[in-house]
Image: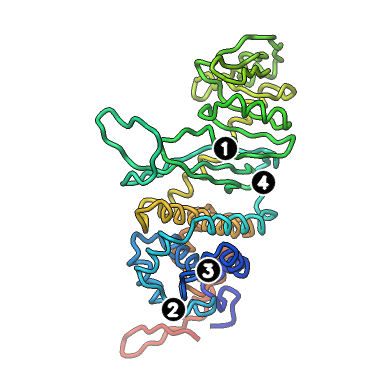
Amino acid sequence: MSKSTFFTGQPVLNQLLGLIDRNNVRSLARRGDHDRYYRYFDTYTHLVTMLYFVFNRCTSSREVISGMKASLHKLYHIGISKCPARSTLCDANAQRSFEVFARIYDNLYRRHKQLLPDSRLKIDPKLFIADSSTITLFQQILKAPSPGKANGKRKGGIKVHTLIKAADDVPLKISFTAASANDMPFLKEIKLEPGSFIVFDKGYVDYSEYQRMTNEGVFFVTRQKKDAKYSTMRLNELSEQSKVHGVIEDKLLLQGTRTQKEGIQLETRLVTFFDKETERTFEFLTNNFSLPPEAIADLYKKRWLIEILFKRVKQNFPLKYFLGDNENAIKIQIWCAFIADLLIKIVQVQLKRQWSFSNLSSIIRLHLMSYIHLFNFPNDPEKLSVMQTNNTRQLKLGGLDISFKT
């Protein structure tokens, strides 16, 4: 075949790993003393093994190790000369702290974050979204104060609290709790710059945090709880444009709770909105008093972006089968799933051709250890098949059609 730019000297996995600073990973492992008890299976090799598992969507440690053994000669370029044993992988998942993988994700995000904003989405770069998603476990590995179900049965689960920058479409901050734990404490971990907007659902009701955000110049948009206690201060007159968009009412409130020890009384704004598509009425609570009421409703609609993120990660990466039955191993696997998600997003935003995330993820999975170019091939995959056809000659011998390439 003639010389082509569709092939390169590194498999797709190695090209993806090239986006990660290997020296930085080793520096993180050294500072945290994460390689102290490992002679061969260092943090970087552990990361490569888990990413191989995630990209290939394996269902067991046996699949991971057997697959890596078959492709070991293709991993020499990245410094891996020995495939770990299954017991070594399982022990490392149980004992090496998940925090080093969290820091690897954070450094990877900071290194490539300038590439992530998609200008085609036209999303305010100061908009942030917070939410949580539960990953079901077959054992009650993480526990939290909870009465359990009426029938006495308990099902384990881990809740992934996530903050995203809406324009980037990848997590900015992640925290884990038991599935039965309350969502509210996650708000205390969020620190944003003045002028930022944060959207979250009515599960994050904490008036002291609302007050903190207001004092810091951060605007929030959430849903009003049905049993909220407040007094109406003033009704704002609605414009015709607001009425056309579905705004029913816009009023200022003095809101608080009798059980709040600090006795906080917040000045808030309540926008009542009717959605014509679903024929439902929503009440949006905010501390922003300058935006038009329809803009407040539109901001809350952006919350669907984080739901798409959760759906994307759960559908494209193995979060049903875990390589360990302990809390640390589960958190490592989740962090590696988010690292894989971020790597694919970094590739996706740099391609000239528009690819859906699921299709691009499938191409990477199918060609993970192939020598195709990670960027050139997805930009024009049809060109490769034309080149292969043009370089194929037909030779007839004894009535048989034999194809060969020149």
Left/right placement of residue 92 relative to residue 255 reads: left
Instruction: Name the spot of residue 374 as percent of width and height, x first.
Output: 56, 67
Question: In this orientation, which residue lies closer to the viewer: 268 or 169?
Answer: 268
Could you classify mark 4 by the number of other residues whose Cα lies within 10 Å: few (under 14), some (14-19), or many (20 or more)?
few
The residue beneath circle 4 is: 120
The three-letter amino acid code for the residue at tag 1 is Ala
> CA–CA distance between discs 4 and 1?
22 Å
The residue beneath circle 1 is: 130
Pair 4/1: label in front? 1
Instruction: Name the spot of residue 381 as percent of width and height, x first.
Output: 54, 66
Disc 2 element: loop
The residue beneath circle 2 is: 82
Tag 4 or tag 3, which sits nearer the N-term?
A: 3
Q: Residue at x 70, y 32 (%)?
A: 218
Instruction: Please give the label number shown on residue 44.
Output: 3
The three-letter amino acid code for the residue at tag 3 is Tyr
Q: Quadrant of residue 123?
A: top right
Instruction: Name the spot of residue 129 as percent of width and height, x first.
Output: 60, 38
13 above or below 127?
A: below
Tag 1 or tag 2, which sits nearer the N-term?
A: 2
> CA–CA distance between discs 3 and 1?
30 Å
> CA–CA distance between discs 3 and 4?
35 Å
Could you classify mark 1 by the number of other residues whose Cα lies within 10 Å: few (under 14), some (14-19), or many (20 or more)?
many
